[in-house]
Amino acid sequence: MTSMQELQVLVILCRFFSSSMADGVKNTVFMMIFTSPGGKPDSTTNDRMLFLGKLISLAISMKSSLLLNCAGVWMQQRGCSKEHLLGIAKTVSDDHFVLSPNKAELTKWVELSPHFTSCFLSTVSEIYGRTGTINQFKPPPRLLLEVTTEWIASSTTLALAPLLINLQPLLPKGSIVMTAVTPFVGLIRWCVEIPLLRLLCQIRDKEEDEIHATEDLESKLLLGLLESMNEKPNLEHRLQQPEVVSPRQMCILIKGVAESFSEIPAEYHTHKLAQTSLDRLGQALQIALASGCLYGNTHELFQALRQLPRNRLLQIIIYRHT
Amino acid sequence: FYGLDNLKSNSVCMINFELDCQKKSISQSFMSMDGSPMALDGLQSLINTLSANVHYTGSTALPKERFKLDVRTLNDIFQLMLKVPACKSAVLECFGVAYDHSVYQCVTNTEKKSDVTTQYTISDEVNDMLKSLLSNRGWTSVLSTWCIKVLGQLSSKYASFINSVNLDDIMNFWLVCPPTRHLIEMMSDCLKNITQEEADSCISALLEMLIEFNPHYDWVVAYMGNSFPEMIISRILSVGLYDSVSNRKETSGNPGKLAKVKSAIGIVCHLSRSHLKEVENGISELYKLLPSGSSDMTEIQKGVLPFLLHMCTASSFMADIIVKVLTSAVSFEVLEIVITNNSWIIEYYGSVEAFRNYLSNVIFRLDESVKGLLHFIFSTEDTNCIVYIQEFVTDFVARTFKKLHGSRPSEDFPILSALLKPSCLDLIIPNLLSKRKWYKDTSVNFLVLLSTYRGSSVAVQALAYLLCHSEGEEQLCLVYRLTNSLQPIHGGLITQSLKAALTMTLINPENSNMRLQLIENLTLLLSWENGNERGKLSAINKFSKAVQMSIEMFLNLLSDRNISIQIVTIIAEAGLSELISDSVAMQIAESLLPIFFISLNLCDPLEKNEAVSNIQAILTKISSQSSVQSFILRMLIKTATDDKFGSLLGRSDESVFHQDNHVSLFEKNKKHSTLVSESHRYNAVLYSGVIGKGPRMAVKRFGDIRREDVAQNLDIFIETLTKCCVSDSETTDGITRVAMILLEILSPDVMYNGLPWPEEEFLKVTIERDLYIKKTLETQPVLWEILRVLAVNRPALCYCSVILRAPLGILMSQWSSEQQRPELLEMTSKILDLMSLGQLLPPPLTMISEILAKISPQEVAATAVNSMRNSSLVCNKGDLVGQLMNTRRPKKTRSSRKHLMKNF
């Protein structure tokens, strides 16, 4: 198949999923096309994902909210942070944040499909950020960070969007609704880890322009996230599941931060950037705990928290919650 | 899929849109759309336009028709790509077709040599559009991937249009073609901008293409290699290596099918010219793959050396690099492991013999790198692998000999020509004297090989080196070994070598050690020859002849006083050739005479005797020619009487310096002091400047010489002189010459030197000359000795009778002034003795000197006068007796007078 033929197929599919048709049917077709038989990754998964990435990218360009909704449902069902989904997010973010960076268009995603946007954020926050040690920390492209911040700031419900949709009627009959994942943990990680990366660059005398200029954005993003979490009590009646932030995910985040600190010499642990990072973590935790976004088995989480360097806010939190 | 119905219903809308599109520009209609269904329709129509007009011809079929899209449409779809990134692969594909058309145009135009240029402006446009994207990092990685692919397709598709298989030609072909040039330039621009990680994946893609489109993709990789040498080269090498290893299994026994290896090697060869350092690093990396432990070799490790050897055969330049890196990158430990574990040889070449044959052929084609190889050979230490290397080198030399014998005389062997270069010879020749036997043997082998190949100059050089640098008999024996194997091929070798060696020592006068060593070696060699020791001399008297031939150079060396005695020994040992020209003989004489006098001053009597007898022998030999003889005699006498050597022969006077520049002390002192000079003040009496002409210039004289030494020296001198006088067993001729020469030297006057004795009165005229001669005779005992020789060999003394006459005249006047002095007496009696010895006095007067001490001065004067008269051929005996009788004499001499009378 030539690329031209591929494009033609893409257009046909795009047209199909953009048509006014019962959502349940559309989602069923979508899942049949893009889920490997048996639901497990197999040899065709890669091609399917590549193709799906292009389809979503096209749908975004075509502003097809219907298709994007389907994609959002599909992504939520597949589990947003699954590895083969990362490829989709990569294609989409490359296409729209790197190759064709149009900020005005990008901000409209929230209107087009908040559900998809939220799922995209969950996935894309896995691509950028920590992928191993802090040396392999890949900062998100500036535009992505900017747009994300704008999205979160403009709509406090965006991050909670997966929790607000009842998927059951949208799915083929007999399907089980999977636990919705919110982008909170991934985005908090950006806010917490980027200052550490910046500090590491300072220590090693490296120049990384992209890391330097985003300080305000991170703060704003964190604020947006905190506000979104605070929104939870107001939306209590609409939420499909009580868990907003998974304690397990949060725990992984904290362990990652601890690991990052292990690579920073101890004398820098009181550095302003390190403390900023810890402050942000503390703020996020405090709000999550206070708003009820984070609850349940937090024992391990606090255990991990104690491994971190000394920070006044964190100590207060540890003191209050244990 | 009930939605499909919906799809069909949309097609009506689509058709309408297409109609709309035909009126407006496509992009306009598309871009003005908003809202999803209509935007999709616009896209759909654009796609339809493209798929209707752009025929993707695939990787083999040539485009049949012209490219239909105009620049505006291309720009539209370019804009589309920017707006809708999901279309990028389709749009780029379309651009690829545009490039395809342009290349086709280009290629066919080149063939037809026509000047149609319209079509490939399309690719120029596209190129400009795409270039605008290069500032965006995201696009660079997209574009580089695309370029890699398109270039691969194009270059394999149109490969049949290139007539050459040479990588340079191919690259040139594609770079002349604008579309491909644009593509590859864009690609290298892209690679410049992307991160390391992306570059890695790009290069992997590049190498995949290399394999996929082999060998048409080589030029792309080579070009990129030029731009990113450190990234590309080592990868290419490892691709080549892995491929050669995996191919061997598939095509074992048929190494011809190593296409990928070939292209890898081709690319590296190409790059080696401009990126030597990177290529060297790459090769060094390959060498590092060789095992360093004793464990079994992996497949890759087995393949390293065959791969490198393969590369050596491909290009001599690569061979140079590979050999150069070998010496630095591979330790002997590793080499030992590799050589002893010959499983790879068996696997790749079948047998050790076949491998040797292959390796010999590889080495035989080496050029510059042979120097590196020599370095390598001459740095092998005594590890186990040395046996293998030795065997191989011997084997190689034997093979080369075989080839040489089978070749035409003018045939060129690059390796031998390379070995003949000074840089290589400088490595080979000094190893002749190496302590390691195997280095020595190898050098000898190489030298024999080389001199068989191109004349004797190498052998001459080597022998000259040996002559100058060998120490001890053992090393010197090598001279014979070399000459014995080479002399049959090249005549006159030894003479040439000797001359070369002498030239070397003359060129480097500061290197006196070398000179001494040469002399020592030569002496040893000559003594072997003359003694015919140890049966070493199949070439008898070769060196004597050589010395004879190069006698002039030895004469030059004689000026070095430190070695002159040894050189004399050498010349004497070697003897002189029969056919020696007068001029050379004169040169010999001239150079030898100072040495003769120097050797007279030697302390060690043995040494002195040997030196003197050597010189005597030589001089005697050359003085057999009469022209030379007179020269020698003159030189002998002149040197014997000059200031420098005279003291050796008892010369006793001090040179007198005349101070004729008389200057007033007062005047001179004025220069040094401005004070008014008053009488009786010190500055009027004392001189404050330089006294006279300053310190007297020291005339180099020999220190105090013992009396018995002087006597011995005199004996030796006279012996030499007489020997030189003998020419063709005829002495008198020479003696006469001596007389004439002596006369010429001693008498400052040209007149009145004739035979006849003048009247007494006439002596007053020649008194000045006479005084001079007498003074000279007084100070130089050697003259007396010469005169004695003349006297003995009658009638020579007659020719220089003036020498006797002059002092006698003076003496006469001194005696007559009644001065009785012992020195007068001595001289008078000496003269009288000489006269009687020379039979200038008649028999009764021969003993007259005996009585001189007994008679009074007046009587002596009278005696002298008489002897003078009598000697002048007219002899009047009575006169003399009468004189004696009449002379008043002092009392004390009476008895002696009686005695005298009695005798009479």
Image: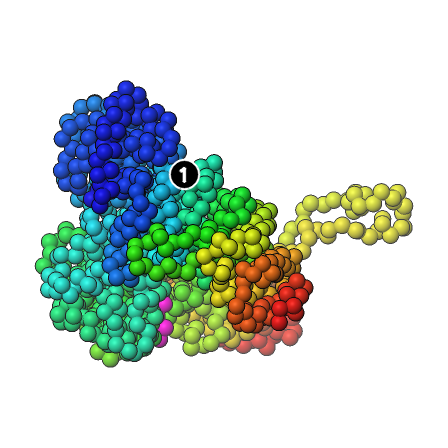
Residue B496, quarter of picture? bottom left
Closest to the observer: B859 or A201? A201
- Residue A265 on image: x %, y %: 60, 65
Is residue B231 something one can see in this rendering?
no
Which residue is most to the front? A237
- Residue B854 on image: x %, y %: 59, 73
- Residue A57 on image: x %, y %: 36, 43
* A167 falls in the magenta region: no
Q: Characterize the local packing of mark 1: few (<14), some (14-19) or many (20 or more) Cα atoms within 10 angstroms.
A: some
Q: Amino acid at mark 1?
A: Ser
Give the labeled residue for mark 1.
A100
Residue at horizontal 17%, vertical 41%? Answer: B59
Label 1: element kind: loop
Residue B75, quarter of picture? top left
Residue at horizontal 29%, vertical 32%? Answer: B41
Closest to the observer: A50 or A81? A81
